[in-house]
Amino acid sequence: MKCAVLSKNKCISVVEMPENDLLADECEVTIRAVGICSSDVNRGYGGGAYFYPLVMGHELSGEITALGKDVGDDFNVGDNVCVFPLLPCFKCASCKQKLYAQCSKYDYYGSRRHGGFAEKLNVCSWNLLKLPHGVSLADGALVEPTAVVVHAIGKASIEPEKHSTLCILGAGFLGLIAVQVVRHLYPNCEVHLVDRNLFKLDVAEIHGASTTLVNNDKSWNNFLRKSESTFDRVIELAGTMATYTAGIMIAKPGARVVWGGNISEDLTISSAQVSSILRKEIEIVGTWNSIYKGIETCDWARALDLIANGLRPSELVSSKINLSEINSTISKLYNHKVRKDKFESIKVLVEPQS
């Protein structure tokens, strides 16, 4: 089968690899769609891989084309499925509480083992969810980031019947999905999105958010000054020290601030900011990944239900590419991220069969 293999930093090429034997509890999934995540950009071009060679790709959907002998009656050949990419140990304290994203010894398709930038992948049946009728394979591939957003929004504890204000810091794919999810679930909540990218903010406005462009120090400082102690809820999804500390400043007394962006630098909080947290009695909570098959909830099931009822994360797909285009595309995404060259894109989907 053909795979896009990361052989070393900044080097991804399509090679032929032998198909692995199908284990008893696995399904062979012919991959139809895989999203390129910002973590793939860092893993591929920022030197962030655990090992080489690696087949990346963890936002994926496909069709079951073979069954292991112990899979049972839950799945059939021809089923369209999405993949929960984390493989928990099932033994640690977190796993025993079914908090699998907090597993202390987990494996992961696309980072700690080979993933979906390939024509086929053998996947443990526990990690598969059937796509409901009418859910496209493109939307199926984006259940993973949608579930991450659903989890983060749940952490914000928005009250459905109460008018409230929410500020989302960061208009990446997760921020734009968050706008859609909040508009679906909480019509009484006013959503405001802040970013330095006008292209993405224009998309957010189509989906019902008000926006602020902060593309220089002056506009950023104006936003902070005008928005001090303004929002009932804040969700940070940009992953910078500036946005982490801004959440403290723009939160109302008694507000809840959710930290979710993967931060790439040390975070320093001043004594004045600590005082603001104390005086305003702000709640700051973290969010990480999503809950899958939990005791009381499943963010993945909720994400699938939202998609089945009209949420369309695939509307944010900027382009669809094949395996041979992954290297050049991730290179462009990385150069845009480090502000070397401009490349306007929200989400790229890989179609390994094209």
Image: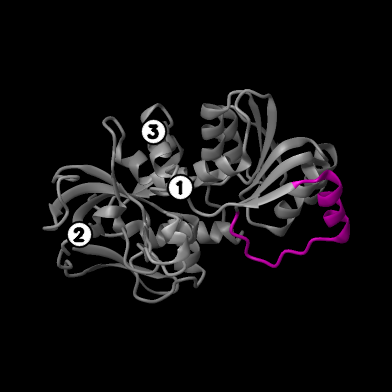
Tell me if mark 3 has few (under 14), some (14-19) or many (20+) residues whose alpha carbon lies within 10 angstroms of its own: some
Observer-side mark, 3 or 2, equals 2
Q: Which percent across, then down, holds residue 217?
A: 79, 51
> Looking at the picture, how far across and down is residue 171, in whole percent?
59, 44
Q: For the residue carrying disc 1, how many other residues have a C-alpha within 10 Å: few (<14), some (14-19), or many (20+)?
A: many
- Taking the spot 45% from the left edge, 56% from the top edge, the residue there is 97
The residue tagged 3 is 305
Determine if the magenta segment contains residue 291: no
In the figure, 247 relative to 305: above or below?
A: below
The label number, if any, that marks residue 235 in the structure image: none
Q: CA distance from mark 1 to mark 3?
A: 14 Å
Is 102 or 117 nearer to us in this picture?
102
Q: Is residue 230 left or right of residue 197?
A: right
Mark in front: 2 vs 1: 2
Helix, strand or loop at label 1? It is: helix
Residue at 26% x, 64% y is 3
Residue 39 in view (yes/no): yes
Give amino acid for label 2: Asp
Q: Are marks 3 and 2 in contact (CB under 8 Å)?
A: no
According to the image, label 2 marks what residue?
25
Q: Amino acid at mark 3?
A: Asp
Residue 330 in sight here: no
- Where, by quadrant of the figure, is residue 300 drawn? top left
| Real-space CA distance between mark 2 and mark 1, rounded to the nearest whole angstrom | 25 Å
Q: Can you tell which of label 1 and label 3 is closer to the viewer?
A: 3
Q: Secondary structure at mark 3?
A: helix
Query: Which residue lies at the image location 56% right of the left edge and 47% below the top edge?
Result: 172
Of the numbered discs 2 and 1, the one sitting upstream in the chain is: 2
Query: Which segment did they paint magenta?
Result: 261-282
**Which amino acid, by three-letter code, is at mark 1?**
Pro
Measured as percent of width and height from the top left, residue 50 is found at 43, 74
Q: Describe residue 295's horizontal placement relative to residue 252 as left or right.
A: left
